[in-house]
Amino acid sequence: MLAQDPLNEMLMRPHRQPYQKHNGLAIELSLAERQDGIWLISEIDMPYGGYIISPLTERDYLGKYHFNWLEPESIAIDEWREFPPAELGFEPFDREMVPMVLSDTKIETHLVIQSGVTELTGEVAFVLEPQCVLYLMPFTMVNSGADEAQAWSLVVDTLRIHLPHL
């Protein structure tokens, strides 16, 4: 039986420790300036047995992969892309199949930034399941280009667990 498998038990143990960052989880953020605009690239290393609800899901899950912006009126998301694409998985709380990030994945996000904006502050936010813990990763984007030129750079903080005040 899977539950009695010592290797499975060892690999799943971090999911049962909600106050400890999962060792198998990592995210790297970068920017790509392409002909069609600015893309925020997230490269996610997923831990064994973990999953994140895809940003492409049609349901408005609070813990799905998303960005929180300090000034949301300054930015819009035009498109999300996933490589490899999310897989349908069973979401046990709502008892339905939803797109999930189950393996190492690159998520590309096409950003539409208001003209004249030179700095954007935000954070990556998602719940790693089955650990059921909110992770946050603050970042700042700065445009040092003159006039219409785009010269965006990215400063990223560390990935951390968000624990509500008890």
Image (cartoon, grey):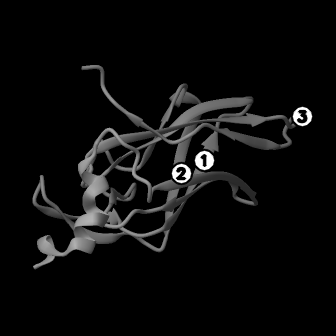
- The number of numbered badges drawn on the structure is 3
Q: Is residue 154 above or below residue 42?
A: above
Residue 161, percent across and down? 40, 37
As helix, strand or loop, the secondary structure at mark 1 comes to strand
Which amino acid, mark 1? Leu
Residue tagged by mark 3?
A: 146
Quadrant of residue 85 within the rendered picture: bottom left
Nearer to me, 31 or 102: 102
Residue tagged by mark 1?
A: 111
Determine whether, in the image, residue 88 is placed left or right of residue 39.
left
Q: Find out whether the residues at labels 1 and 3 contact each other: C-beta distance under 8 Å.
A: no
Q: Is residue 38 above or below residue 116?
A: below
How far apart are the alpha carbons under marks 1 and 2? Answer: 6 Å
Residue tagged by mark 2?
A: 78
Determine whether, in the image, residue 8 is placed left or right of residue 155.
left
Nearer to me, 9 or 100: 9
Residue 58 is at least partly visible in this image: no
Which amino acid, mark 2? Asp
Residue 29, percent across and down? 61, 51
Which amino acid, mark 3? Ala
How far apart are the alpha carbons under marks 3 and 2? Answer: 24 Å
Q: Find out whether the residues at labels 1 and 2 contact each other: C-beta distance under 8 Å.
A: yes
Mark nearer the N terminus (1 vs 3): 1
Q: Residue at x 43, y 63 (%)?
A: 46
Q: Residue at x 30, y 25 (%)?
A: 164
Nearer to me, 66 or 79: 66
Determine whether, in the image, residue 26 is placed left or right of residue 152.
left
Residue 52 is at least partly visible in this image: yes
Q: Name, please, the residue furthest toward the bottom.
A: 1
Residue 98, percent across and down? 24, 63
Q: Name, please, the residue furthest toward the front.
A: 6
